[in-house]
Amino acid sequence: MRKLMMIIALMFSAAAAAGGPIFSNTGGMGSATSTLAGPGREPTGGTYNIDGTNGAATFRSVGSVSVAHRYNTDFFNPGDDYARNGNLIRVTDSATGDGKIRFPLLIDNIVSSNRTNGPGQASVGLGIRSIKPNFLTSTSTQEVDGLFIQTKTGLHGDTSGILVDAVGIDGGTSFVNLIEGSVMLFDTSGNITRKIRYQGPSFQPAGSPPGYGTQYYAEKGVQAHAILIDGESPSDYWQNFVYAATAHSEKWRVAGSGDEYLAGTISARAMIATGAPPSTNTGSCATLTSATGGSAAGAFATTGVCAVATTIKLTFSLTAPSGWVCGLQNQGSATVFRQVAYASTSCTMSVQSVATSASDVIVFTATAF
């Protein structure tokens, strides 16, 4: 009891009772690098005082517990398990498998209040504040983080940085989120200039069907990207971005090359052709201007007559899996075109009847397959 009380007090070492600290690193607690030994000082009646607010506390020890200080170490060193210049709480879990989860420290927040719903009046099981004084005008380059979690496992046995159970009641009206939060930018006067709020994965049990998936809300300012997935170098990249539905059936994929694959249909107000337009000067009729538009649609003009039986060949910078299907329409003459050949980078059209004039505008469409 007394030993675990001292462990909890070390976690809140900045907090003090009205008459001074309840615990300290001297006077009965041993040296700064030892496990606790000797008579500790604990408040009367099993209560503690943090920031002037009294609360009842009950502590129970599970397993072997020790507390120590470790210095000049680094969280991110693969061989190191200890915090830099921090307090170490070590619990040795040597129990056999009995189907029970074990916590070195368990905070049991029993909520019996009935305040208005919303994060501003939430009952929070554990709060962490990590801030710079006068942060609105601070010029310090020190990184400030709220929580660091490190797990390590061997060849067998799963590991997760965070395990979460978030539970609501089906048919209710409240959101149930795995994670909810905001990222914000302030100006030096404390006004919010940019804000993105995140919820997800989420349920709203009253929905039909319940649930919203994952949501990003751009609540303030202009945001450059909705979702950005990037690699650190040309050798480190996401090979595919995949959306899969029931039984892992692939519905949508964006490959690392930028190619997009869709199992369903596309509905849009318009499909706008982009990319480099094809070249037009490799057929037997080459008296043509350069094409404008994109790869899938555009236009070019004749600068001379394309007689019957001559060909116009469109050559694309994009390589199709098998070939290209093309269509040409003459805006100035009643020319009839027919496709006579295709390749992975080109399509060839023949003038079937009615030669072009020397200044016709021809529009084209092209689809890769």
Image: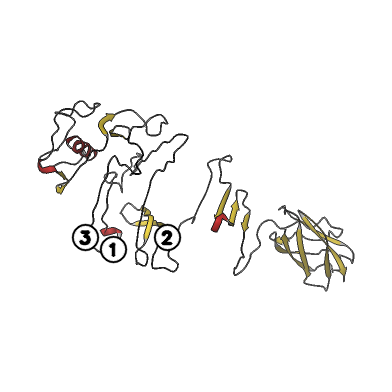
Disc marking residue 113: 3
Residue drawn 64% across and 64% down?
A: 272
Res. 60 in view = yes
Q: Nearer the viewer, residue 338 or 184?
A: 338
Rate crowding at label 1 as few (under 14), some (14 to 19) or many (20 or more) other CA atoms within 10 Å.
Answer: few
- Mark 3 surroundings within 10 Å by alpha-carbon count, few (fewer than 14), some (14 through 19), many (20 or more): few
Dot 2 falls on a residue whose secondary structure is strand
Badge 2 amino acid: Tyr
Give the image location of residue 47, x and y in percent: 14, 44
User: Which quarter of the image is occupied by the N terminus?
Assistant: top left
Q: Please state which of residues 174 and 85 is positioned toward the viewer in this rendering.
A: 174
Q: Mark 1 points at which residue?
A: 117
- The disc, 2 or 1, on the residue closer to the chain's N-terminal end is 1
**Amino acid tagged 3:** Ser
Judging by the rendered image, the residue that carries numbered circle 2 is: 217
State how far apart marks 3 and 1 are (Cα). 11 Å
Q: How far apart, in angstroms, are the residues tagged by discs 3 and 2?
A: 30 Å
Residue 228 as seen in the image, left or right of residue 350:
left
The picture places residue 161, in percent across and down from the top left corner, at 40, 43
In x, y percent, where is residue 184?
A: 37, 53
> What residue is at 41 percent from the left and 29 percent from the top?
79
